[in-house]
Image (tube, grey):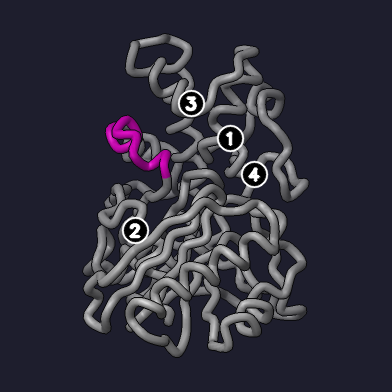
Amino acid sequence: MKIGIDLGGTKTEGILIDDSGKELSRTRIKTEKNYDGTIKGIISIVKKFENDFGNSKSVGIGMPGAVSTDSALVKNANSIWLNGKPFKTDLEKELNKNINLENDANCFTLSEAVDGAGKGHAVVFGVIIGTGTGGGISINQKVLTGKNNIAGEWGHISLPNRSDDEKKFVKQCYCEKSGCMETYVSGPGFASCFNLKHKTNYDSHAILEEFRSNDQRAIEALDIYVDHLARGLSLVCNILDPDIIVLGGGMSNISYIYEHIDTLLKKYIFSDTFNTKVVKNIHGDSGGVRGAAWLS
């Protein structure tokens, strides 16, 4: 029996699978945007599963950010109430069991590499474009974390070759750096760029509704968005040259991306040929939580 938990910015999802990967139970709760509330929410999910199915030896958790190899405290989380906290230690104390923490994008990537859209490919780059932006690397169905636990942190590289408008119509990232991919290609980042330019107050869903109604501002915004995505991914391709790129998160459901991104990537990468496909995930919102379960 394996318990996996995907800690997101708006929801926390739990799944229970058997050793073959068959789903036994699933639950979802609202993420409390404070440290104590987040801890209590995770405990409630674990207790629910164990009350129904028996005790587990460990729990796998996918979370934003990573655990510092020096301090064992959380770093780089866009759920900023986790940063600087002994998250793993506190959970192990409360649950009296081993907790396997991994970056949520790494969990997503592992899930898609094992039995999702990246199955059969040796090098998979997984991308989260949702509330936040992240990336993960799977090589032969094993997550590459790196020396400092930051491998794949694509959301916090700078958008290449920013124009004056791209510098002007964007908010500073929560990490206090400028030009991060997250501020352009996450759902909130996409909406913020649009609102700053057009003096509106839309969220990403409203902009996409305008796009479906053939609003010219929204069409232009989507064209710019896909271009931003391609420029950011071109850096990954030039360094990692993955076999396949799998997109996840709410923005990955935009079909317009897949109609145009291959052409744009070929424009930006350093190669005369380019055969890497950018594809939508198979497991949907379950990718991260399934990957977390495989950690336990």
Quarter of the image where one finds residue 66: bottom right
Viewer-closest of 180 and 161 = 180
Q: Which residue is mark 3?
A: 224
Residue type for callout 3: Ile
**2 in magenta:** no
Q: Which residues are magenta?
A: 250-259
Q: Nearer the viewer, mark 2 or mark 1?
A: 2
Residue type for callout 1: Gly
Label annotation for residue 286: 2
Earlier sequence position, callout 4 versus callout 3: 4
Residue type for callout 2: Ser
**How far apart are the alpha carbons under marks 1 and 3?**
12 Å
The majority secondary structure of the magenta stretch comes to helix
SS at circle 3: helix
Earlier sequence position, callout 1 versus callout 3: 1
Residue type for callout 4: Cys
Crowd tier of the residue under label 3, counting other residues whose Cα lies within 10 Å: few below 14, some 14–19, many 20 or above: some
Earlier sequence position, callout 3 versus callout 2: 3
Earlier sequence position, callout 2 versus callout 4: 4
Crowd tier of the residue under label 4, counting other residues whose Cα lies within 10 Å: few below 14, some 14–19, many 20 or above: many
**How far apart are the alpha carbons under marks 4 and 1?**
10 Å
**How far apart are the alpha carbons under marks 2 and 4?**
26 Å
Q: Nearer the viewer, mark 2 or mark 4?
A: 2
Query: In the shown orientation, is residue 52 left or right of residue 205?
Result: left
Label annotation for residue 138: none
Q: Is residue 241 visible?
A: no
**How far apart are the alpha carbons under marks 3 and 2?**
29 Å
